[in-house]
Image (cartoon, rainbow, N blue to C red):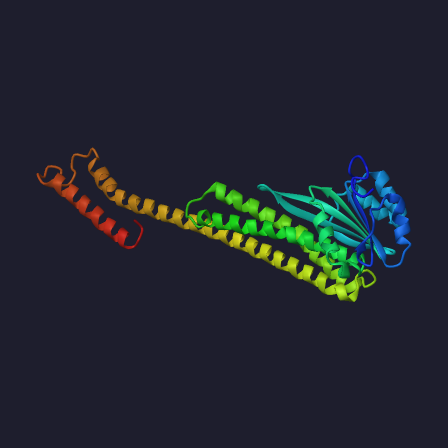
């Protein structure tokens, strides 16, 4: 039985390959027979398996109990660990569903003649990856290392549409960012975009580190002729991480520019208020002086005293207004 071997669909696929060619459909009872042959390997795909299924995988492939425990619990950090004759790899996957980003985990057990993929959460399946590998039998004949590369490459490729969507979102935000007005919605969206970029970066960067370590330190699992493929994954991820870092820097700079523009406008407002305050101070002083209830005020009985006081006030205010306008305060 090849697909949906359990009622819950936890065993998605069990495939055997000999010299890159797919064998007949396998069941759990035939895994040992295929592993015993030279030039063969088994690829098992699981989705949120229970303890019984993982215990069966542990028995069939000789998996380390600590790695199996991590795969059972999920919510692991991305990593690569060696356990005797096998590797345990944890990847953080991401893909877009409508307007949201769905994150999940893929745990990989890799041995000289087997590959077990365990998916947790909202993670896309690897049917297309398997199909692509089977179309290149000459490379699949190298063993599970090529299938491992194909999964890493698929995970890295799924990051690309997300980072491109982030770029589109940033372009839409630019107009609001460089306004001098303080827009809480724009600033809030900037913080949200920065958070999402950091989350994506934290998922993507370990994939490049894992590809680099597989290429440099695990020759028993990765043949020399396949190292270039893992280097390609590393380069791909490095470019994505660089794009994320650049965008985060641009968001930080844009936010600082927005705050600086808001500060400049506030200074302009303060300057205008100070200028008008200075202008209004002139009539305030004059009229306050003549509003005193003293009998012996100068020019109090003079016929032209009132129009002269008003005229001097108007002229003084006008002169002060023009000078402040010339200096840019009004």
Q: Nearer the viewer, residue 177 or 160?
A: 160
Q: Quadrant of the N terminus?
A: top right
Give the percent coordinates (x, y) of residue 308: 13, 43
- Residue at the bottom extreme, as displayed: 224
User: Position of 197 compared to 328: left or right?
Assistant: right
Q: Would you say 133 lies left or right of 259 here? A: right
Residue 132 drawn at (x, y percent): 71, 54
Is 319 or 233 nearer to us in this picture?
A: 233
Residue 113 visible in the displayed image: no
Residue depicted at 69% across the width and 48% down the height? 93
Please give the name of the residue rendered at 81% of the width and 64% of the height, measured from the top-left corner. 219
Is 51 or 132 nearer to us in this picture? 132
Query: Could you tell me which residue is drawn at 83 percent across and 49 percent down?
Result: 24
- Inspect this view and state whether residue 248 appears: yes
Left or right of residue 117: residue 256? left
The number of callouts visible is 0
Q: Look at the picture and state if 64 lies above or below 5.
A: below
Quadrant of the image occupied by residue 312:
top left
Q: Position of residue 203 (x, y in %)?
A: 67, 50
For this orientation, the residue located farthest to the top is 293
Q: Give the residue displayed 60% in from the left and 47% down from the top.
A: 196
The picture places residue 170, in percent across and down from the top left corner, at: 51, 50
Residue at the extreme left of the image, as rendered = 303
Image side of residue 316 versus residue 108, left or right? left
């Amino acid at each position: 039985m090849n697909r949906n071997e359990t009622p819950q669909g936890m065993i998605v696929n069990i495939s055997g390959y000999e010299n890159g060619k797919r064998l007949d459909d396998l069941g759990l009872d035939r895994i040992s027979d295929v592993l015993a042959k030279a030039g063969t390997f088994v690829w098992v795909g699981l989705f949120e398996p229970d303890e019984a299924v993982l215990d069966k995988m542990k028995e069939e492939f000789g998996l380390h109990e600590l790695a199996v425990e991590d795969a059972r619990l999920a919510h692991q950090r991305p990593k690569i660990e060696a356990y005797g004759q096998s590797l345990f790899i944890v990847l953080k996957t991401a893909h877009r569903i409508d307007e949201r980003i769905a994150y999940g985990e893929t745990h990989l057990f890799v041995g000289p003649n087997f590959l077990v993929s365990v998916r947790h959460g909202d993670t896309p399946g690897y049917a297309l990856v398997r199909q692509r590998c089977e179309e290149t039998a000459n490379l699949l004949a190298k063993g599970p290392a090529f299938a491992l590369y194909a999964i890493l490459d698929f995970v890295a490729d799924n990051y690309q549409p997300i980072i491109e969507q982030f770029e589109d979102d940033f372009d839409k935000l630019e107009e609001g960012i460089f306004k001098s007005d303080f827009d809480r919605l724009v600033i809030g969206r900037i913080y949200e975009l920065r958070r999402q970029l950091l989350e994506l970066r934290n998922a993507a960067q370990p994939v490049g580190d894992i590809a680099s370590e597989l290429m440099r330190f695990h020759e028993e699992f990765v043949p020399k002729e396949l190292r270039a493929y893992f280097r390609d994954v590393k380069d791909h991820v490095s470019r994505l991480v660089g794009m994320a870092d650049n965008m985060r820097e641009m968001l930080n700079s844009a936010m600082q520019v927005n705050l600086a523009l808001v500060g400049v406008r506030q200074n302009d407002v303060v300057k205008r208020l100070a200028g008008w305050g200075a202008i209004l101070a002139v009539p305030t002083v004059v009229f306050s002086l003549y509003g005193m209830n003293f009998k012996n005020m100068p020019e109090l009985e003079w016929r032209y005293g009132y129009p002269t006081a008003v005229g001097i006030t108007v002229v003084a205010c006008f002169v002060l207004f023009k000078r402040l306008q010339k200096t840019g305060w009004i």
